[in-house]
Amino acid sequence: MANKKTRAQRRAEYLRQKAAAETQTISQTNRRENSEAKEAVQQIRLIPLTSIVTEEYQRVLNMKNVAGIVRDFDPAKLGVLVVSHRADGTYSILDGQHRLTALRRLGYTAANCIVLEGMTVQQEADYFRRQNENKQSLRIADTFNASVWAEDEESMRIKEIMDRYGFRLGKSGQPMCVCAIGALQSIVRQFGDVALEKTLESIAVTWPRDTTILRREMLAGLGEFWKRYADVLTPRQFEARMQARLPMELFQELRRRTQGKATPGTAFGKSIRFTACAVLVDAYNKGLRTGSRNRLKLEWDLTEDE
């Protein structure tokens, strides 16, 4: 019995030291990043799991990850959760939602937590984003979602345009679900908000049930297309000429013209996005007389850097 008590005491001391070290690391990170969250008061407390809630700015749970934690569970390696104490008495999980879920599955009723006081929901989301943005496991969609909750200006503009035309974040293979959120960010940064709005509106009215058009390569081509023709063309005019064109055929033509070099990683390179735009322009012009004023003209911009 004495030996068991000694091991328990050693484990408790180990967890206290680990929690103190993590608290110091978080404080140093907050000061280095000049985050608003650095003003939050921090304490280490035992918190009932029933009082811990998960907000929408958190990433989607990876249940395989949870199952792995449960299978290989070791209290000594658990560490501490990071939560934000709110005025309503609940604790919003900021770091450790997979461990939290595993603890619940294992029947635990409480966990040691680093408790931050005095944070707004926006500060919580920004804290989550900053703590996780350099982790390989955090997808860009998770970062974007957290940025919206943190009221990042660019992310909020993109989300507002998505909402306006019925798009949402989602997995590939689902109509009107954008998986390549990084492509929308690239469109805004390279071509501007108008190009993004025209891109999403033209997809919504022309191919609302298609998923190929939401590939990064096609989004890059549409961004280039609307950067060039937003002043002379409307999405409804685009729909009238393009609704009979199949996005998969357009994508295959892009792959053919680029000899397979059009990939998600190269989509926003100058030559690839220009070629994607050229595929769209040729499809738009198909059936129009050579001298028709409705034909679109496309010229390579030699002054634009790659």
Image: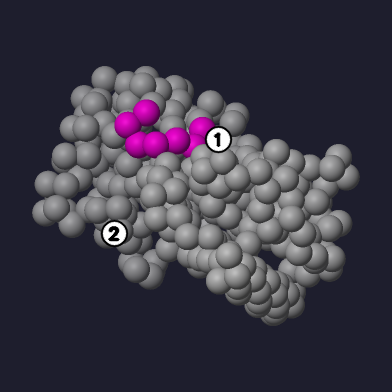
Depth check, front residue: 142 or 119: 119
Query: Tag 2: Cα neighbours inside 10 Å, few (<14), some, or many (≥20)?
Result: some
Q: State the predominant SS element of the stretch in magenta.
A: loop
- Up the image or down, 195 lies above or below 25; here it is above
Query: What is the magenta range?
Result: 168-174
- In the figure, 15 relative to 173: above or below? below
Residue at image location 80% in from the left, 66% down from the top: 42
Query: Residue 271: x percent and y percent?
Result: 27, 59
- At label 1, which amino acid type do we have? Met
How much space separates mark 1 and mark 2, taking CA atoms?
Answer: 24 Å
Residue 45 image offset from top left, x and y in percent: 77, 59
Say whether residue 205 is visible: yes
Which quarter of the rendering shows the N terminus?
bottom right
Q: Give left or right: position of 269 versus 194.
A: left
Q: Residue at x 40, y 45 (%)?
A: 67
Task: Find out whether residue 292 is within the magenta segment.
Answer: no
The residue labelled by disc 2 is 266
Which image quarter: residue 285? top left
Q: Which mark is residue 162?
A: 1
Of the residues under marks 1 and 2, which one precedes in the sequence?
1
Type of amino acid at the residue the image marks with label 2: Thr
- At x 84%, y 65%, the residue is 41
Of residue 167 and residue 45, the one placed in the foreground of this image is: 45
Q: Is residue 66 left or right of residue 159?
A: left
Measuring from the top left, give residue 60's x and y in whole percent: 50, 42
- Is residue 11 or residue 45 the one in the foreground? 11
The disc at residue 31 is: none
| Label 2 element class | loop
